[in-house]
Image: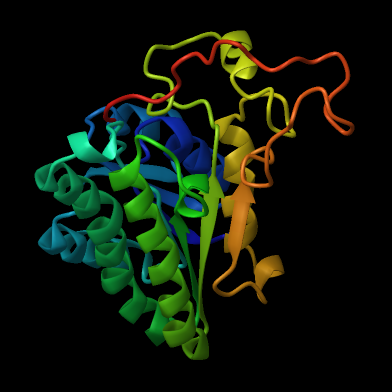
Amino acid sequence: MDKVTLVTGAARGMGAAIARRFIEEGAWVTLTDVLPEVTATAAALGERADSKIHDVADEAGWATLTEALIARHGRIDVLVNNAGILLFKDLLSTSATDLRRILDVNVVGTFNGMHAVAPHMIRQCAGSIINNSSADGLHGANALSAYVSSKFAVRGMTKVAALELGPYGVRVNSVHPGGINTPMANPQGLPTAQLDFAFKQFAAQRVGHPEEAAECFVFLAADESSYCMGSELAVDGGLTAGHYYFGLPGSPPGVSAPRYMPPVRPTNK
């Protein structure tokens, strides 16, 4: 996969895992983030990686970033809109300011990325844009009104972009991770065994890992997914498939309903 790839929110967690997996496939990857750690993350990935400090909500910054990529490589083959932030508040405690802050990064940031990169891909008559939504972009979740709103919006924008850009050879799809052990979802650094306990009511019976999610992004960037346009790829261990009614037929044998759910979501990134 000799593809020029841009991954946002790549300093750590899922973004870093996505960048690493693309490089293993032979891609050239630019990692961006507002966190300065992105420089060290890129350096550890070798000569096929470089990094930029970049705020996805900054429209002008996108123009500078894409121009630099075109100047260096002559093309942009893949955009992974991964950058995002999370807010854990109930509906009545969430202010309009809170909502705007989440939307500015998760929705406007994704829009800015597509808006900046798509013209270059149209000229190439080829490209893949992969928007990182969430399992919470497929269903509701208490205490996540702002986050869920943003991820449903990403899901919708993806479908519009797929329709409008598809005739020009540009594919746009969304990935919907859920229950992935990243610094954003597990800021306390809880051990895996404790996190696994929180997911016993779902099919996988455990928390997911960033490397598992990264495989989905590689697939949607590859030529083998050429007929995927506007697709929603859930990588959530069955979280959106439903949950078990413990004690009834079909539930895992020997497993009872968890009595304690460890906290796995932070108040912000």
Q: Nearer the viewer, residue 267 or 95?
A: 95
Q: Is residue 1 visible?
A: no
Total labels: the figure holds 0
Q: Nearer the viewer, residue 2 or 176?
A: 176
Q: Residue at x 40, y 25 (%)?
A: 265
**Which residue ends up furthest to the front in the rendered image?**
248
x and y, in percent, of residue 254 in the image: 86, 13
Q: Is residue 258 left or right of residue 94?
A: right
**Which residue ends up furthest to the bottom in the rendered image?**
167
Q: Residue at x 53, y 16 (%)?
A: 261
x and y, in percent, of residue 267 in the image: 28, 26
Q: How is the image coloured?
A: rainbow
Q: Is residue 243 left or right of residue 96?
A: right
Q: Residue at x 44, y 83 (%)?
A: 165
Would you place residue 190 above or below residue 133 in this image?
Answer: above
Q: Nearer the viewer, residue 245 or 150?
A: 245
x and y, in percent, of residue 105 in the image: 23, 50
Q: Is residue 87 visible?
A: yes
Q: Nearer the viewer, residue 182 or 241?
A: 241
Q: Residue at x 59, y 19 (%)?
A: 198
Q: Is residue 250 left or right of residue 134?
A: right
Would you place residue 184 above or below residue 136 in this image?
Answer: above
- The image quadrant where one finds the C terminus is top left
x and y, in percent, of residue 134 in the image: 48, 48
- The image quadrant where one finds the N terminus is bottom right
